[in-house]
């Protein structure tokens, strides 16, 4: 079986380093917000080219805390894409704000900047673009609109750590960027974890305060916060992995390139485009008759996943927002046709050739 992602293969490739990092933390007996965490925050800030980085409990919490730190509150509206994981809009809703969706560009699966302006109202407070699958959004256009209307911009980089927009690493291009270290992400820990990166000292200070119960000094709480900290164990593991990230991204890019070379002439298939430096958090095709292809690949020992089968505006959890089917045709088309193929740095070229021959065989027969 070729799985969608193989976390064990990655572990085996760096086992001695990881084991000794974990042992090191166990030996110190210190597990919360110690030098492992502050050290790793510094490394991520340097990697992403931002002045500040604050480790938190998950990518979802990174989004929530960044939104709060940017002043998003009850009754506000935040513009985002309907074609993403629900954590994006969940974070907005958790602030008491309303997610306002804007359709995607089918070439990149990212929010279409030309459709943002018509959705801005007097309640709009921020824009939350998502760098889907690892491909940066059109940030110049988004930032220009935000500037004109005095809106904050928060980037959801959960799938795109290390991706670059015109030479700038994502997350540091706007007011704040949110990273996820969920195990299956481009940089994944062995459990949950996340980070807010920013060049804004005020946002950094606020997130730092809020992630630890709003405490400035221990047991003195100027504001109410939450408990959402990056564990020292995760920080130690992620710090080891960060040293390998650039080479893993190059591997991902080369696998993606091989896939696209072998599949681009198959009539039924749309391979991913690369507009800006893409890290291929997922390698995603579009194909008609997806269900049958997915079933066939499963029978041939190839694991695939649909990211994501229902756009957020059509989720039951958001029925109160009253979006009708057909509101966002591109997002709705994508939800019917996207299919993620196996993608991880350790995937072998021979395996990609096998996968592509199966995909091609199926498409040519049906
Ligand atoms: C994974 C993901 C998140 C949430 O990250 P967690 O660390 O799992 O909380 C948010 N947004 C997107 C686009 C994601 O893919």
Image: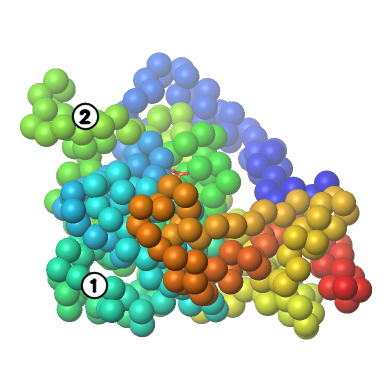
Q: Residue at x 26, y 32 (%)?
A: 226
Residue 213's disc number? 2
Q: Is residue 252 left or right of residue 330?
A: right
Label 2, ligand 1: CB separation under 8 Å: no
- Quarter where residue 19 is shown: top right
Q: Is residue 226 left or right of residue 325?
A: left
The answer, for residue 71, to whether it is visible in the render is: yes
Q: Identify the element where label 1 is drawn.
A: loop
- Quarter where residue 285 is shown: bottom right
How many residues crowd around disc 2 within 10 Å: few (fewer than 14), some, or many (20 or more)?
some
Q: Residue at x 36, y 79 (%)?
A: 115
Task: Measure the C-alpha gap from mark 1 to mark 2.
Answer: 33 Å
**Residue 38: where, in percent of width, then height?**
31, 38
Colour convention: rainbow
**Residue 265: where, in percent of width, then height?**
78, 83
Front one among 148 and 254 = 148
**Residue 198: where, in percent of width, then height?**
26, 56
Q: Is residue 68 left or right of residue 254?
A: left
Q: Quadrant of the C terminus?
A: bottom right
**Residue 277: where, in percent of width, then height?**
50, 72
The residue that label 1 is drawn on is 120
Q: Residue at x 82, y 67 (%)?
A: 359
Q: Identify the element where label 2 is drawn.
A: loop
Q: Is the residue 21 above or below the residue 348 in the image?
A: above
The answer, for residue 152, to whether it is visible in the render is: no
N-terminal of the pair, mark 1 or mark 2, is 1
């Amino acid at each position: 079986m070729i799985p969608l992602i193989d976390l064990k293969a990655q572990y085996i490739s760096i086992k001695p380093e990881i084991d000794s990092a974990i042992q090191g933390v166990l030996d110190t007996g210190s597990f919360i917000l110690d030098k492992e965490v502050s050290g790793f925050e510094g490394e991520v800030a340097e990697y992403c080219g931002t002045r500040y980085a604050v480790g938190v409990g998950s990518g979802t919490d990174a989004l929530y805390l960044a939104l709060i730190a940017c002043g998003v509150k009850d009754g506000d509206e935040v513009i985002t894409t309907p074609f993403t994981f629900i954590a994006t809009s969940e974070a907005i809703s958790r602030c008491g704000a309303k997610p306002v969706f804007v359709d995607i560009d089918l070439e990149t699966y990212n929010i279409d900047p030309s459709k943002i302006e018509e959705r801005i109202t007097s309640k709009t407070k921020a824009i939350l673009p998502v760098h889907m699958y690892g491909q940066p959004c059109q940030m110049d256009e988004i930032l220009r609109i935000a500037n004109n209307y005095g809106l904050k911009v928060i980037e959801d980089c959960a799938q795109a750590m290390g991706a670059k927009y015109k030479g700038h690493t994502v997350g540091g291009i706007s007011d704040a960027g949110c990273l996820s270290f969920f195990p299956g992400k481009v940089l994944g820990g062995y459990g949950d974890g996340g980070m807010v990166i920013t060049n804004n000292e005020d946002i950094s200070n606020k997130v730092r305060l809020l992630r630890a119960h709003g405490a400035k000094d221990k047991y003195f709480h100027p504001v109410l916060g939450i408990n959402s900290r990056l564990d020292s164990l995760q920080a130690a593991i992620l710090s080891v992995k960060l040293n390998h990230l650039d080479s893993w991204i190059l591997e991902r890019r080369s696998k993606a390139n091989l896939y696209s070379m072998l599949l681009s002439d198959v009539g039924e298939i749309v391979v991913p485009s690369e507009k800006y430096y893409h890290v291929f958090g997922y390698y995603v095709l579009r194909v008609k008759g997806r269900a049958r292809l997915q079933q066939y690949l499963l029978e041939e020992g190839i694991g695939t996943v649909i990211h994501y089968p229902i756009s957020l505006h059509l989720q039951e959890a958001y029925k109160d927002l009253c979006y009708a089917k057909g509101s966002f045709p591109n997002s709705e088309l994508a939800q019917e046709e996207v299919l993620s193929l196996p993608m991880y740095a350790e995937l072998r070229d021979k395996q990609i050739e096998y996968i592509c021959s199966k995909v091609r065989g199926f498409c040519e027969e049906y």
